[in-house]
Image (cartoon, rainbow, N blue to C red):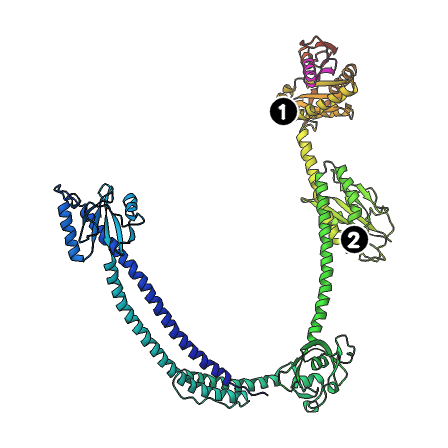
Amino acid sequence: MRPLSLTGPLVRIRSQIVFSMIGAAVLIGFVGSVAIFAQTVATRSLGLIEAGNVARGLANTLTFTASDGSPSLLDRPEALREFLQMQHDRSLRDFVIVDPNKIVIANASDDAHRIGSHFDHDTGNEVGQTLADGVPRQFVDPHEGVSVLTVPIERSEGKIVGAVLLEYDPLLRAAEQRTSDLLWLVGLAVAVAMLVAAGFAWVLLRRFGAGMSHMMKGMEALAKGDATARVSHVAKDEFGTLADGFNAMADQLASARAHIEDIVETVAEGIVVLESDGRIASVNPSAAMMIGRRADKIVGQPWDSVLKMHDHRGGAFASGASPVDMALSTGRRHQGEVRLIRSDGSQLPAIASCSPLSRLDGGLVLSLNDISELRHAEGVVNERADQLAALNSELHERSETTARLVKLGELLQACVTFPEAFSVVGAAMTEFLGGLSGTVHLTSASRNLVEEVVHWGGIKSSINQFAPEDCWALRRGQEHVAGPGMLTPRCAHITENGNKGYVCMPLAAQGETLGILHLCEPNAAERPQWLAERRQILRGVVDTLALALANLRLRETLRQQSIRDPNTGLFNRRYLEETSSRELRRVERSGQPLTMIMLDVDHFKQFNDTFGHEAGDLVLKQVAATLIEHARDSDIVSRYGGEEFALVMPGCSIDEGAERAETLRLAIRQLHLAHRGRTLGTVTASFGVAAYPEQAAGWAELANAADHALYNAKGEGRDRVVVARAGQPGERPAIQLVSTARTSADGQG
């Protein structure tokens, strides 16, 4: 191993210290020079500022007016000259006062500018500019070679009445003298600082050299492999602290080396050290266990004689293609999955990682990681992945089924009548149930009969009508399955001989059993799981269908309640008006007549007063039953209100309507009613007949004409038929008496 030399770094560090000290001295000199230059510039600026302050103070003094009304110095020439002379004697500076026309009005010891002369020593007319804009300016007098500052003289109202010209060279020279004295002190301080810095540098280099010498000896010994090397520096300075740290680090390295050796011996990862010629230098116990040989039988042997490697598929590597061969030949790191062929012939999956050593004689470290448990876990994960894929497919299928069920529910909810719902069910069942044949049977309103309402498929295994007790599903209130090899009894409504399988499922919703869904599987013997495959979707279909049929039946019930009279079961007046108007438009388009009969039970209040309301309701029900018995399918029979009824007959003429009314009158008269053992007597009714288009051009006119005819029948003695005849527009229809009856002995007409 090449020895480590620390002389070069030490020389470089010393040079850096010397250069640093020289740089510090240069920096101090540079800072001092900058300070001298800045002070010189500041001195000139401060001198100018001081001169400006003096000139402004003088200008303010010249324009000052006392509170007693005394004139200012500017208005008193003699006093002004005396004041300027006094200022000159005090400050040894020359002053010149000019008026707005640049005429000298006063001066102090300045023979060059006589009073009354025009001031023309400002080559750039600086004084004239200051008198014009009031801005102070400086210039050099070319005749005397002095610096002059001009400041405007202003009255309190802001008017410029002249200017003060001040020579400020004496001020500047005084400031420069003070600056010169200060700069000598700064230069002396800089020189002293540089000498002190040089002394500190010399002392620092001596101490640094001694400390670094001890540190270098310890480091070089440690670099040569001497684990016991320590630094013996005893000074209580930074190098002493570094020496203590170095010694502590050396102790930790020795401890870490021993710890690493323990780890290599106990780690689960197999570690094999190879020489550059491919011989095994050392192995740890884990590697010996993976190879299947003792460590003393491995060390010193060529690696390929004790390490048999195949690729991850179990095939032999091509010559020089194994990770070890490639790392030895290229000197670079290689890694790959291999299978170790152990001494007993078994194969161990492992990750072989070959890392070249950095020492001069070469070699590499081969690490072997046992991944047999990982591969086993991967197999388990793959198996779980297959299961998840199957579950995902099942969930997808269920999702599609749910979507179809939702669509079926929406279609069924949109149906208005039971035939519409049955057509939807017949079209959807083939798709839902995979081609199985089946039927839907509903329980009749009387609950004594179950009737087929829809059938699909090519097999019919149930009769059309049967009693509820013929189906085990209706008996038990749950699904009933029967088929080949099953001990369950077969329903009485099943027509086949038992070779086919079937299921009956009750259609129950809102606490009511509406019927059954029946399915037949002709190949139940070959497909014993035919129902289990469809049970979930079948349950959804049954629930959806049952709820839709229950809602449809409820809507039909509510519709009937809204259009029928609850006492007689006839249509009510609202339904009559809506339907009759529609029928009137239809017969108008076809050119057919339409006749309306209105009748009223005679002396109905007498029935209620004599026999009670229950007897009156019985009379109304029997009259309604008589009307229904004599009505056609196309006729509309309704309770118009109270004891009044109406019969609308499309396609019937006025004469046919009168005959029908007479027939109804006689049929009602022949009713023999009794209530609670009491005979109610003869029931009669009065009839009014009107027709379209003879008596009316619209529904309101037709009803009005029939109503007037009814009132005429009442007024002419009751128990008779009166037909309305057409009159002039705006007139009441004429009346024709069709039949009469004598008043009976009990007072009824």
Disc 2 crowd rating (10 Å Cα; few below 14, some 14-19, many 20+) is many
Q: Judge left or right: residue 565 versus residue 31.
A: right
Which residue in the structure is indicated by mark 2?
A: 481
> In what element is the residue under mark 1?
loop
Whether residue 478 is situated above or below residue 683 in the rendered picture: below
Q: Judge left or right: residue 152 versus residue 677.
A: left
Q: Quadrant of residue 527?
A: bottom right
Task: Find residue 748 and report its horizontal and vertical position in percent.
Answer: 68, 15
Task: Find residue 344 and report its horizontal and vertical position in percent.
Answer: 76, 85
Q: Amino acid at mark 1?
A: Gly
Instruction: Determine which of the numbered discs, if any, sits on residue 281 in the image.
Output: none
Q: Quadrant of residue 528?
A: bottom right
Q: Nearer the viewer, residue 228 or 717?
A: 228
Q: Are marks 2 and 1 in contact (CB under 8 Å)?
A: no
Give the extent of the magenta segment.
685-710
Q: Amino acid at mark 2?
A: Val
Whether residue 225 is situated above or below residue 102 in the rendered picture: below
Instruction: Determine which of the numbered discs, if any, sits on residue 612 in the image.
Output: 1
Task: Find residue 667 and report its horizontal and vertical position in percent.
Answer: 76, 20
Q: Judge left or right: residue 19 versus residue 376.
A: left
The magenta stretch spans residue 686:
yes
The magenta stretch spans residue 183:
no
Lower position in the chain sequence, tag 2 or tag 1:
2
Task: Find residue 457 and report its horizontal and vertical position in percent.
Answer: 84, 46
Whether residue 106 is situated above or below residue 42 in the rendered picture: above
Q: Which quarter of the rendered picture does the C terminus lie within?
A: top right
